[in-house]
Image (spheres, grey):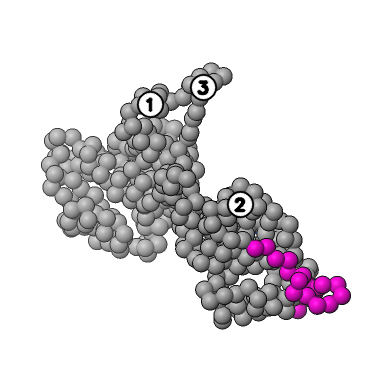
């Protein structure tokens, strides 16, 4: 792979001479060239910026030097990376894509950015990628180019002494990395988790995976595949102290139901805290927390030989990840032996709920007495 980096601060790339890229260069995996943009200026002041059309603060990078720089650097199969806070976020998967490229040209802007016509013109003669390394603002594109180059170069085949070490990395399998330890086994009163000293590789692998899922669920639930959060959340019996948060979650969830069913006369929407406290005493109820936040709940009780399941609640930001399915399965598994039928009800227009219940084997069994807009669904045990 060839990498060219263009900037008005070329010294920013000195680190590339050091560890990583230096090693890759020595292994013949890459050749890197750093260019000072000013070599493509022709005025006495080697100007690379000017005032913005339309006014406003700051300066904008002139198109001409960039045009000439790219004229010289672009080849047949070049990919030009403009680093910008408005770019596509860099991810491990994106870095893997970049590692497949033959030639990367990093165009590192400064000031308020590069004249947009440079990006538009370049897109007509090469692959253009606008990439951001995160939702914060830097003063220029060099640091981002360094980060993208490092994330890419280290994935080049033959770079890592032991390619296996790549497999177990953060984000490689969509999870954050598990905690790591080395000698001594005791340090300042802190132990190393015994499983890691057990030599039982199966148990160690399981522990590490569980730690990675737990850490990801706690710190980056957005990264977790839909099912993982559902599988990882602990459902525990609700207590009186949960009532207030249950009320808040219930109102939020049934506001959604009110919207999809275009009705407000839904009991759950009108309950008070006392009502919740009261039914906590009449129904078996389970709740789940994420980072201490009550994010899911379900209740159930026996009515003759019917196990009534209800108030399946999932916080809006965690919906669509299989938690509803997990809550339903959990409540079903808690049904006592004498329960021969499982029953629940929902709004006739609550399509997502109806899809979940149909997939779980429930079938319509009429409507609630005096309420045609609420359908009852049952399933034989
Ligand atoms: C390139 C100029 C500075 C940005 C006015 C401050 C990437 N994740 C990222 N954050 N910031 C950048 C980045 C910032 C840059 C340039 C990348 C060129 N600036 C500008 C817009 C607001 N100043 C980045 N990748």
- Secondary structure at badge 3 equals loop
Residue 19 image position (x, y, % from top left): 61, 47
Read off the magenta span: 33-53
The local crowd at label 1, few if under 14, some if 14 to 19, many if 20 or more residues have their Cα within 10 Å, is: some
Q: Residue at x 55, y 67 (%)?
A: 103
Residue 302 image position (x, y, % from top left): 20, 38
- Secondary structure at badge 2 equals helix
The local crowd at label 2, few if under 14, some if 14 to 19, many if 20 or more residues have their Cα within 10 Å, is: some
Q: Is residue 257 above or below residue 166?
A: below
Q: Tag count in the figure?
A: 3
Q: As rendered, which of 265 and 348 lies closer to the eye?
A: 348
Ranked by sequence position, the earlier of labels 1 and 2 is 2
Foreground: disc 1 or disc 2:
2
Ranked by sequence position, the earlier of labels 3 and 1 is 3
Q: As rendered, which of 371 and 214 lies closer to the eye?
A: 214
CA distance for labels 1 and 2: 38 Å
Check if residue 52 falls in the magenta segment: yes
Q: Residue at x 53, y 76 (%)?
A: 76
Check if residue 17 falls in the magenta segment: no
CA distance for labels 2 and 3: 33 Å
Q: Residue at x 54, y 57 (%)?
A: 28
Q: Mark 2 — residue? A: 22
Q: Mark 3 — residue? A: 184
Foreground: disc 3 or disc 1:
3
Q: Mark 1 — residue? A: 195
């Amino acid at each position: 792979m060839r990498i060219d980096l263009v900037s008005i601060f070329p010294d920013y790339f000195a680190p590339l001479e050091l560890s990583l890229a230096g090693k890759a260069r020595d292994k013949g995996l890459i050749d890197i060239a750093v260019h000072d943009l000013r070599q493509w200026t022709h005025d006495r002041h080697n100007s690379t910026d000017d005032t913005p059309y339309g006014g406003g603060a700051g300066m904008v990078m002139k198109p001409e030097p960039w045009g000439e720089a790219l004229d010289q650097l672009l080849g047949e199969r070049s990919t030009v990376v403009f680093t910008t806070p408005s770019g596509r976020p860099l991810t491990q998967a994106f870095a893997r894509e970049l590692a497949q490229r033959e030639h990367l040209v990093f165009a590192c802007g400064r000031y308020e950015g590069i004249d947009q016509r440079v990006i538009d013109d370049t897109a007509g003669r090469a692959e253009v990628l606008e990439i951001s390394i995160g939702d914060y603002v830097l003063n220029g594109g060099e640091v981002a180019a360094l980060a993208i180059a490092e994330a890419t170069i280290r994935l080049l085949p033959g770079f890592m002494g032991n390619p296996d070490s790549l497999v177990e990395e953060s984000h490689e399998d969509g999870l954050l990395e598990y905690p790591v330890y080395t000698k001594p086994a005791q340090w300042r009163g802190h132990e190393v988790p015994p499983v890691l000293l057990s030599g039982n590789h199966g148990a160690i692998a399981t522990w590490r995976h569980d730690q990675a899922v737990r850490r990801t669920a706690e710190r980056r639930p957005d990264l977790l595949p839909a099912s993982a959060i559902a599988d990882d959340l602990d459902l525990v019996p609700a207590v009186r102290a949960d009532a207030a948060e249950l009320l808040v979650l219930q109102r939020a969830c049934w506001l959604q139901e009110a919207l999809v069913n275009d009705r407000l006369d839904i009991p759950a929407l009108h309950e008070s805290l006392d009502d919740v406290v009261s039914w906590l005493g009449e129904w078996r109820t389970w709740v789940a927390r994420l980072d201490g936040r009550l994010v899911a709940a379900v209740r159930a009780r026996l009515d003759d030989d019917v196990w009534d399941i209800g108030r399946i609640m999932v916080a809006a930001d965690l919906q669509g990840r299989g938690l509803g399915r997990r809550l339903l399965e959990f409540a079903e598994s808690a049904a006592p032996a004498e329960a021969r039928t499982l029953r629940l009800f929902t709004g006739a227009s609550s399509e997502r709920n109806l899809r979940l219940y149909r997939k779980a084997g429930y079938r319509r069994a009429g409507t609630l007495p005096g309420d045609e807009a609420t359908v009852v669904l049952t399933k034989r045990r």
